[in-house]
Image (cartoon, rainbow, N blue to C red):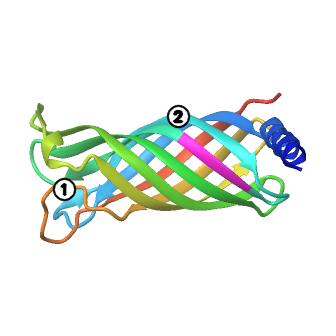
Amino acid sequence: MKKIMLVGAIALFGAMNAQTKFGLKAGGNLSSVSNTEDNESKFGFYGGAFANMPLSASFNIQPELIYSGKGVSFDGAGDPRLNLDYISVPVFFQYEATPQFYLEAGPEFSFLISAKTKYDGASVDVKDSINGFDLGIGLGAGYNFTASFGANIRYVAGVTDILKDNEDDAYTNGVLQLGLTYTFQK
């Protein structure tokens, strides 16, 4: 019986692995930080890779590994900005409403790689005052124009305070992503 279960598990894993699609994605971020005064959204870039695995006929799970530039710009002379660079690992569950159109939702786990404030051309490292981990919850949608090319839009709302040792109102990331995907065909 154990051998039959082992063979079945290997066969199931092989079938799932055979249906897994891999791809690349890239696009723009429009990000902000909550509870900041006189702020404006900041434009950034994101890019990385994904694996799309079917769970059923209409549901998929898509883990990703992406670089994501977040932060905020402030009104004022000298173009003050907070630049936050993350390696993000979103794990999104997708519902295929049609063969081309899907809706998605899930958590995003982000790990800080750089944090700098910029003002009047000068840059100051502030990584020691920013939490190294950021958790967000995202919602999105996408459309596949062909089997290889698609576009998606996603909003990720941060749920953890980005500041270390902060006892006041939480400062959380918020990012709107708009981008393109390329899926490799077997």
Check disc 2 and report its element: helix, strand or loop. strand
Res. 69 in view = yes
Res. 146 in view = no
Q: Which residue is drawn at 81% across and 60% down?
A: 58
The residue that disc 2 covers is 48
Dot 2 alpha-carbon crowd within 10 angstroms: few under 14, some 14 to 19, many 20 or more: some
* Left or right, residue 48 beside residue 170: right
Q: Mark 2 belongs to which amino acid?
A: Gly
Location of residue 123 by image quarter: top left
59 to 25, vertically: above or below:
below
User: Which comes before the other along the chain, label 1 or label 2?
Assistant: 2
Q: Mark 1 belongs to which amino acid?
A: Leu
Q: Residue furthest bottom?
A: 169
Q: Which of 143 and 103 is in front in this view?
A: 103
Instruction: Please identify, in this view, whether the residue under mark 1 or under mark 2 is nearer the observer.
Output: 1
Q: Residue at x 16, y 64 (%)?
A: 37
Q: State the image coordinates of residue 117 (x, y, percent, origin top left).
A: 15, 41
* Left or right, residue 16 beside residue 154: right
Q: State the image coordinates of residue 27 (x, y, percent, origin top left).
A: 51, 40
* Left or right, residue 92 beside residue 5: left
Q: State the image coordinates of residue 69 (x, y, percent, origin top left).
A: 36, 41
> Which label was assigned to residue 163?
1
Residues at marks 1 and 2, CA–CA distance in whole angstroms = 26 Å
Check disc 1 and report its element: helix, strand or loop. loop
The answer to if 70 sits in the magenta stretch is no
Q: Residue at x 28, y 48 (%)?
A: 71
The answer to if 61 sits in the magenta stretch is yes
Q: Nearer the viewer, residue 46 or 19?
A: 19
Q: State the image coordinates of residue 165 (x, y, percent, origin top left).
A: 12, 59
Region of the chain picked out in magenta, as a range: 60-64
74 to 159, vertically: above or below:
above
Q: Which residue is drawn at 42% across and 59% down?
A: 136
